[in-house]
Amino acid sequence: MGARIKYDCHFDDAMKKVVSILLSSVLAVCMLAGCEGSKPSDSKQVLKPLGKNDKTTIKLMYESEELFFSKYGNLFNAKYPNIDIQVIATRDIIAPDKDAIKETNRLVEEQTPDVIILGMDVFESYANDGKLYELDSFIAQDRNDISGMLPAVTDLLRAKGGGKLYGLPHTFFSSALFYNKDLFDKYGVPVPNDQMSWDDVIRLSKRFPADAEKVYGFYPGYYGRPLELVKAMAETRGLSLVDSDNLRVNIADNDSWKPIFELAIDAWKSGSVYRPMTELERVGGAYGLFLSSKVAMMIDSTNLMERLKENKQTAPSWDVVTVPVDPKNREITNSINIYEVFAINQKSTNARAAWEFVKFIGSDDFAKWNAKAYQGGFPVRTGYLKNVDGKHLEAFYKLRPSNQSLYNDTHQIPLSFYNPFEEMFNQEIKHAINGSKTVDQVLVTLQQKGQDMLNQAKMKGDTGIGTK
């Protein structure tokens, strides 16, 4: 579900992780006035080329006009001076007290943008609801070479689009397991390797002297709350919290959840996992712990890598391996995400101009510029994926992306369900950690209370992600 961009992957709570990604990534870009293409289902759709002197207008929805032009518009206009760009600043339209997803969906309907920028969950919903143009025929018509894109990225987009390509990105985001080489050497612990399971990581973490010397073996990073750690472990194993087809909470009835709870709770109780006591510690304090050699392993994005580079003189020796994986399927990861997928609205009356913009965003030219500008994340063009100081950065993107998530088919699940459910979820895990409840009791409570919350949200007539 998307993220607040630039990219700080640490969020105040689980719902912010869901909504802030969606708010920033459902922002729509549009281009108008030109040729009209066929419907997305028509694999033979043909676009007329823009004439050399043809002038057209690009209308777009984005957080602000200034931000859009600094990221995309100025460079695009340098190549396409005949395309005028108009920006509708969503920052001034979507009030903080409004439902960001509903408001953005409403604006998409009212403004009819030709190109829409979407986060992955909303992108999947729009693609499968027939709201977007299928791009494969456009790519073939223009002989646009996308073979230079990272296969993990295009595979993920096709998985979300039922096998078809409905959008192009310029950047993807991912996480890795950072480790402090100096600490592993000091305590004689074998260094991590790619494709370890969560059990492997927790076992390694217990070999560091958290009690005596306050050296924590592991900090889960943005999984720093018990809730987030359990969710990360479950998602790695392909579990879902809700059966979206039947709108049924899927915890107590699934035997796979119990060992995950037991592993996470054991990790917290062992003292080997750093457990922040305040939000300030959770969001920023762990960086300092890693930099000062108080944490041996930490899951994070390129944010930590940038801080290590900025503090090169005092930072420990470090490297990265892949995030933990499912031991039954070690080639798959849930860590790859795309916060801005550029897609063409099926209602567009200017598909050619829209395609020129989308094509530009996914082009080698834009990747070359973006790699120099560094707007966070990794370029989707493999020619610009470069290692830093010999680090094993392939760990960020060597695994294949999974199309599974804890909330599959999110347009079926009422939006008002997530926040109260996850707050209750977090409290119940705390009961298990402090011993006031057994794991079995927690699972039953999550099943029963969670189902009540889901039923209530459904009765409200609330809609899911990507729906009006």
Image (tube, rainbow, N blue to C red):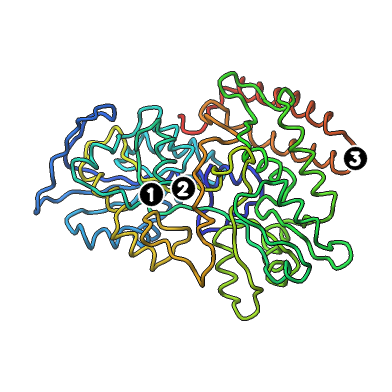
Instruction: Tell which of 115 and 432 is nearer to you.
Output: 432
Which of the 4 image quarters holds residue 351?
Answer: top left
Identify which amino acid the numbered label 3 is placed on: Gly
At label 1, which amino acid type do we have?
A: Pro
Residue at image mark 3: 435
Do the residues under discs 1 and 2 have CB atoms within 8 angstroms?
A: yes
Expressed as whole percent of the image width and height from the top left, the position of residue 59 reads 29, 47
Q: Is residue 390 above or below residue 301?
A: below
Count of picture labels: 3
Label 1 vs 2, first from the N-terminus: 1
Tell me: 135 left or right of 333: left
Give the x, y percent position of residue 43.
24, 30
Of labels 3 and 1, earlier in sequence is 1
For the point 72% across and 32% down, which residue is it?
Answer: 257
| The C terminus - image quarter | top left
SS class, disc 1? loop
Lower sequence index among marks 3 and 2: 2
Q: Disc 1 marks which residue?
A: 169
Label 3 sits on a secondary structure element that is loop
Give the numbered dot on residue 338. Answer: 2
In 3D space, how far apart are the residues under numbered discs 1 and 2 (Cα atoms)? 7 Å
Q: Percent from the top left, x then y, of residue 148?
A: 33, 53
